[in-house]
Image: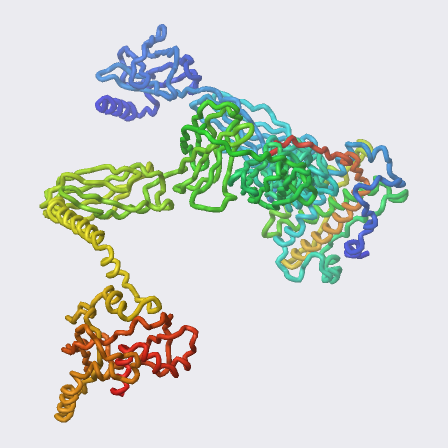
Amino acid sequence: MTSTWVSVIAMLLAFVSGDEMLPCASVQTSSSVVVLGSPVTATCVIRDGCPLARGQAVHIEWHLGQRLVPSSPAANDSRTSMVVIPSFNDTMAYLTCCVQASPCQIVGGVAIRAGYPPAVPQNLRCQTNLTFPSTLTCRWDPGQKETHLRTNYTLHTEIRDSQENHTYELSAGVHHYTIPRKDFSFYLEMTISVKAVNELGEVSSEPVILEPLRSAKFDPPKILKVQAGLKKYGCLGVSWSLSQQQTWVTISSLNLEVRLKSADSNQWSEPVIPMTRVMLKRPVEVCRLLHGTEYYAQIRVRYQQSPWSEWSSRQSGVTLEKAPTGRLDSWMKVSGDHKQKHLKVHLFWKPSKQFRANSQNVSYIVSLQRLRGERRQVCFSLGHYCSFQLPTGAKKVFLFAMNAAGKSNPTEVPVFQQKAGTVISDVTVLPRDDTTLLVQWTSLASPGLTGYVVEWRPLLKSDPSLLRFEITDRNQSGLVITGNFEPYQPYGISVYPRFKDGIGPPKTVNAYSRQKAPSIVPKIWVKKTWHSYIELSWDEIPLGQRNGIVQNYKIFYWDEEGHIEIVNADLEKRKITLKELNAMSLYEAFMMVSTEGGSLNGSTINFKIEPFDAVAVVVMIVIPCGVGLSLLIIITVMTCFSNHKRLKVRFWPMIPDPANSSIKRWTSESMQDIPAFSDFEEPNPIYLSHLSFLDLPKKLDKNDDVHWLHRGSEDTSDLGESICGSPLSPSYSGTNSDSVPYATVIFSGPYTSQSANQPHVYLRSESTQPLLEMEEVFSHKSYQNMPTDGMTTAQCFFGPSQDDGPEERADAGILWGDFPFLQALTFNEAQID
Amino acid sequence: FSPLTVIAIPCCYMASFVRSAPLPELPGVNRTLVEDPGFQELVERSHSLIQKVLLSIPEAHKSCIHTETLQLNSAENAKLVVMAANIGIPSAPVLKVVSDNFTLETCLSRMSEGIQLHRALLSAVLPRLDKKDRVNELLADTRDLLVQIHKMQKMVQGESAVQPTPPALNLRLPGEYEVQVATHLTLVQLQSFGQDMVRSLRIFYRPSSQLHLKELYNAHLVKQ
């Protein structure tokens, strides 16, 4: 290829160097721009002076690009060649003429372009912009067919009334133009067209005739006010205006569209409400609206068939109120026995599909009707819940809705009885999304079943007003309930069977709209161990931290060697027993709690099975101890039965009754029932018939010893006599036929200061003189305990019960005479003092 | 006769009628012609356009006048009477209440003259202004207004009605200050003349086509 071009250049240079500046050949074609696929004809004429043809016949070839094109020499002229390309299918190609030499020398060429005539511009549309600076912008589509040729567009406008014509040349590839304000009139019709031109032809679009203002897109209008007219029930008047910059448009043929939506709705009403030929600055009125309802309104505007403006900003207004209409759906839950005087009633209600509150502020009244027909209001509520006591006499409950305009007709709520018997056998809840749950249930065939009540409430909130319900008919076995279900929060969903005359027991399940892993895992602890077993236990996860329905409690544990075991715990028991544990190994364990939404692992604990065999302990120690204890109890019981009286005396000591006893009996009979002090050995009190008290001085001098010894030598033998011979003992006879042992009690301090825990010293007397012989003369006296001032030595006073204290003191000597034994104690005390 | 007198005391300010009031029996007015829907449409369009001019004047004034002492609706404008004469600003035609002595044809003719005058004044100062957009918009609006008035004239006078030629002006604008004053006085005078036009057009404006046009649509809202 390179060598070919070099040859051509050399030849041409030679031709030029011959001082002939003419080209060696001339190439002519029928058209340098043709319609794609059309024939092309070309002629190549070699000049006489061309060195390639000088003195010889030439052979001419044609090339279209790289391809050789068959050609034929012209008749009678070998220096002229003509080529015909029947179908030129390239968008652009070079046709060259070549003189056959070695190599073939190109002597001329021509570029040929092919394409199509311009397509008719389509969809010419123009829109006026009224915002300063006002303009008129026109757009069009160039057509689908590719022309392969440069196409220029011109926009032509003609205003016939003012005889103005304008042409706007556009850059290639631009298919829109904005006409300045000076070139159009708002109210004059103008004809607009687009002309497309390329090398194969020109074509104009269909002209568009328009009045610029009628093609204007207005700014969003303004709503000045939305309000209900006086006594215009169900109607709202919308005051409006065009935007501030467009208030000059005072034409009367504006069209308006209004759309409304109630305040609690998310969607605008469809279709929009058309208002044709509205009057500027006059409110438009929209009717057939709900009473007492807040609506948001938006408007848009256009002039005749011009494009609609964008929607205005919204404004709200409230229609006039009317009394509520329609009935309420209710759900009454009665608790308590019908035998009681009052029943506790929880009444829930909600608007039925037919109910119209006709107000933004509606309240509810619940009243009872007694048997006599009188009604009594029991509730006034702004919500949808009420709790009250239902007297047994009340047979009907009525529910009213009330607003500022009046009160609705009553909705009668039947008081159903609670019925027994299982009807709902199973309830399942499937979450659909965050706001809906699918509740399905199966029920047993039950006569009289009229339908079901599905109720749901958040379990972590105790407010009863949060309870919601739906009433279904008997053919339904499922219901999609909708509400603001919070994710990860438990809801209790109950399905109640509904009968003609009552409500059956519900089936209740817990459900979540969305679940995740629990917030906590309960701490596990070792409850007990035995042999190779260990029992682990844990607390229940608080409901608020479960975040879903617990699927399983899984315990992972492993020993020191890393042998991992996994066990699933019973969901209800909250404990598990790990078996076949190695007593010598330290174990680690943790719990994993799973819900449908995920799992959470708890902290790890360590435990070890002690080698001490607890079972052996039980067998070797506890059982013998038990057997021994049992034998001891049996023996004790038998002993007690055999010595019933002794046992009785030991535990319930007999208190002698002075009124029904004598000193002899007391000493010989009653005293034997008094238990002896076991702290020290003492003579059997049965044999103690005479007693005297001697105070031992803490520090005895020799004289005292002597005196004491003297007195002892003197009195010891006469001790009994000194008492018994006392004139205070008139009944003493001084004779005694029986030998009675004597004893003297020696205290280490004054008698009155003797403490109970100080042991006394008994001095046994060898006297055999009887002490008492006249006990039988004692009259029976009652006794009484009496605190006596100044008589600390005698806590017990014997004497007639009717006697007063002072008199008793005066007669003490006589009384002591009746009790010589005690008198001796008193006497000795006086001596000590 | 001072042009500012015309500005200050519009000749036909008394003609401010309530839009919706029935057309009074006005001398010099062909009632049948005026109540023709075509004529009413022209009146309506003219009214709209002159309103647009009136709305545009404050913005145009703001964009063109940089002298603080030259304010629209200012009493200081009374001090510019001599300047107006020196520059050569003609006073606007006087619009009066249509009567036997001031017929509808005369009124329309005065309107046309007045608009042409102010278009000529705006065109004269336009080359000397830095910002021309607002004035160009005013020129286009007054041009459209002129077309509507001419159409009304044709309806009143027939095809023989001749559109008046623009007045020949020879404004003396030797310096920037004169340009500012001339532009200011033109806008002030156009504002006053436009307000007179609004009052005059209201006399002819018969909103019969607007009466009871409000079509109440009973919306079939979905009761919720």
Query: Residue at position x 48%, y 38% from top?
Result: A483
Q: Is residue A765 placed above or below A475 in the rendered structure?
A: below
Residue A364 vs residue B134, the one in the foreground: A364
Outermost residue, top side: A75
Residue A582 vs residue B19, the one in the foreground: A582
Question: Could one spot residue B138 in this view of the protein?
Answer: no
Q: Tell me residue A807's x, y (percent).
A: 41, 81
The quadrant in which residue A234 appears is: top right
Q: Horizontally, is A361 left or right of A608 in the view?
A: right
Residue A369 vs residue B171, the one in the foreground: A369
Q: Is residue B87 placed above or below A396 in the rendered structure?
A: below
The quadrant in which residue A317 appears is: top right
Outermost residue, bottom side: A703
Please identify the quadrant where the C terminus of chain A is shown. Answer: bottom left
Q: Tell me residue B156's x, y (percent).
A: 82, 35
Query: Residue at position x 51%, y 25% from top?
Result: A474
Q: Horizontally, is A590 left or right of A728 in the view?
A: left
Question: Could one spot residue A351 in this view of the protein?
Answer: yes
Q: Horizontally, is A706 left or right of A262 in the view?
A: left
